[in-house]
Image: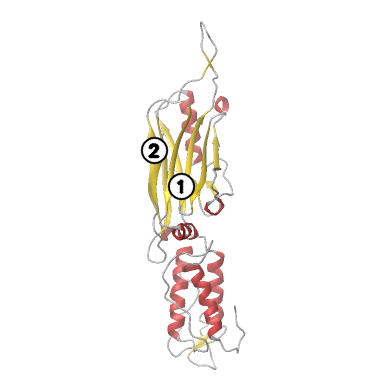
Amino acid sequence: MSVNTGDIITAAQYNGLQSRVATIMGTGSGTDGYGQSLSSSQINAGADITALDMDGLRIDINKANNHQLGSNASIGNIGVGDVIGAAASGTDPDNLDQTDKGFNDYDTAVGILETNKFLLDPGNSSVEAAISSTRTTAWNGVIEHVFTVTFADENQRRYFFNSGGEIRFSANLSGGNDPKGTDWATLLSNMGTIKFNYTQTSATGTGTGSNIGNNDLTTSYQTIFTKTGSGVYAENDYNIAAKRDSNSVLRFRVQFRDDDTGDQQSFGAGSGPVDEDVEGRITSSIQQLRATGSNVSVATPSYSNVSTL
């Protein structure tokens, strides 16, 4: 909460600001909280706000801002002897000339953190290999890759997604030089990388995502992404479904559905449509985007295959 020029900044106002920072950077609850240790803390009612108190708050704000946007917040360092004003601070109470060091500057900076709380700056994150499944034998019908993602507990799951974490999916087929294999290779290439975050699933390429993310999962499978084939192979599709096994375990089902019933013609006795197999090497690859580094770092979950291609 901002203060008016001339007002005395109280311990309650400082504690309110520090609590908002702690909600984002600390344990929080629900969709708030990165699970990090804090440099700032609450102060006693009626206590004076010291430079040390403000410095701890500045450190926490800058860590969060770097995590989200890759830079420090627009706030100055309040030093020993500074008078903390509403819009400015300085050593001369009659001439507070440091305009980035006022209490309201800190309040504004925290408001920006709250707006951007799910953002993750690329320089403060890592894209990491998680798990995969590969098939080299010809197939038809439906094959699937099912895996679980296990967090240490429910809070660690919250921290992973609250801090901008994602589970990422991609797939490819190589060596399938027949028309159906070529169509599958094109389908998988065109969808790019599918990104599952706190509240949605989207793709860097083409396909149909959803407004379903970590926060929307139930104990039943929901389809979060679909990509279909083209032309005579429009019946074929790649799709991902997800559900929550428990508060700390997520389950994903990646299906490659070759539902084409046959369009190529054979000749001679029993001639008619032929539903050819899919040949080549097909791989389902899973990665994760995770907050890492000195500002915000969350624990990695473990991945385990339940069913392979």
Task: Answer few, some or many: residues within 10 Å of disc 2's Cα (few below 14, many 20 plus, some between 14 and 19).
Answer: some
User: Residue 241, percent across and down?
Assistant: 52, 42
Bin the neighbour count of mark 1 within 10 Å (Cα to Cα): few under 14, some 14-19, many 20 and up. Answer: many
User: Looking at the image, what colour scheme do you see?
Assistant: secondary structure
Vertical placement of residue 254 versus 41, above or below: above
Helix, strand or loop status at disc 1: strand
The residue located at (57%, 84%) in the rendering is 86
Q: In the rendered structure, which disc, 1 or 2, sits on the residue that comes first in sequence? A: 2
Is residue 220 at all visible to an observer of this figure? yes
Give the residue displayed 55% in from the left and 39% down from the top. Answer: 226
Kind of residue at disc 1: Arg
Residue displayed at 48% across by 80% down:
42
Q: Amino acid at mark 2?
A: Ser
In this view, the mark in front (1 or 2): 2
Observer able to see residue 204: no
The residue labelled by disc 2 is 133
Residue 234, image x and y in percent? 57, 29
Badge 2 element:
strand
- Position of residue 47 relative to residue 63, above or below, is below
Q: Position of residue 63 (x, y in %)?
A: 44, 69
Mark 1 = which residue? Answer: 168
User: Could you say which is closer to the camera, residue 109 or residue 309?
Assistant: 309
The numbered disc on residue 210 is: none
Tell me the distance, in whole angstroms, between the alpha carbons under discs 1 and 2. 14 Å
> As drawn, is 94 to the left or to the right of 72?
right
Placement of 305 over or under 139, stated as above or below = below
